[in-house]
Amino acid sequence: MSLTISRAIVDAILEQSRAEYPDECCGVILGPAGADTPIRHIPMINAAHSPTFYEFDPKDLLALYREVDDKDEEIVVIYHSHTETEAYPSRTDIAYAGEPGAHYVLVSTREEIAPATEFRSYRIIDGVVTEEEVSITA
Amino acid sequence: MSIEVRIPTILRPYTKEQKSVEAAGATLSALITDLDAQYAGLGERLLENGALRRFINIYINDEDVRFLGGLEAPLKDGDSVTILPAVAGGSVDSL
């Protein structure tokens, strides 16, 4: 298991996480159905506007899934930022993880490691978290 | 009375991997009862202690059922129901 993703999208996500600090940021990366290839980055609004919680607005969520269906795409990556803690899924993240086929990416912009950042990817299936390798391409 | 219900990936093991199923009911509550009768165990993934689970969003046509009366939301022939897992989480273990 691994995630292959472009440097441009990684940089855009890290930039979003800094721009929305101290709130958590979130979004998805879509790709062609069945290809497991993240191509189309879609930043989403964190409807919770919170430093410790994120949530897609239910209306945005429905619109997103409609678009995915209409364009014959899939949600390849679901990502969010942790602003003060490690980029590792919390119990809340695990409880909510509802896409067994998606890569769950967490980034961290916590101060202890600044200016470095973390960008890590996981599978979360039936409550079990498995970290996977991330390959960043040019 | 026939209502199309769209099933998210995570619940398709209950529906023999069907993306969309047909069910009946004059309210969302009755629809879920019918779904559970057809696909055993599905009801429990939608309800907890008789209320809608917070990890799940249900829509009638384009509207979130939370704004339509929740489990009492009325349904009519030809309506389309979409079930989606909420996308949410956070750094604090609030659960």
Image (tube, grey):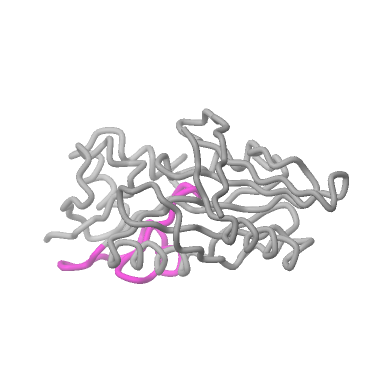
Which residue lies at the image location 43% right of the left edge and 56% below the top edge? B57
Q: In the displayed structure, does residue B43 sit left or right of residue A128?
A: left
The quadrant of the picture occupied by the C terminus of chain A is bottom right
Residue A99 location, x and y as percent?
A: 43, 45
Residue A91 location, x and y as percent?
A: 63, 36
Q: Quadrant of residue A27?
A: bottom right
Q: Is residue A40 above or below residue B30?
A: below
Q: Quadrant of residue A25?
A: bottom right
Which residue lies at the image location 40% right of the left edge and 42% below the top edge? A101
Query: Is residue B67 part of the magenta span, yes or no?
Result: yes
Q: Is residue A111 above or below residue A39?
A: above
Which residue lies at the image location 33% right of the left edge and 56% below the top edge? A32
Q: Residue furthest left?
A: B1
Q: Residue furthest right?
A: A112
Q: In the displayed structure, does residue A119 sit left or right of residue B52?
A: right
For the residue pair B5 and A25, the one nearer the viewer reads as: A25
Residue A53 location, x and y as percent?
A: 67, 53
Q: In the displayed structure, does residue B24 sit left or right of residue A105?
A: left
Q: In the displayed structure, does residue A111 sit left or right of residue A45?
A: right
For the residue pair A78 and A120, the one nearer the viewer reads as: A120
Query: Is residue B74 part of the magenta span, yes or no?
Result: yes
Residue A110 location, x and y as percent?
A: 81, 49
For the residue pair B38 and B83, the one nearer the viewer reads as: B83
Q: How many marks?
A: 0
Q: Is residue A84 above or below residue B45?
A: below
For the residue pair B56 and B13, the one nearer the viewer reads as: B13
Which residue lies at the image location 31% right of the left edge and 53% below the top edge? A33
User: Which range is magenta?
Assistant: B52-80
Q: Is residue A99 above or below residue A50?
A: above
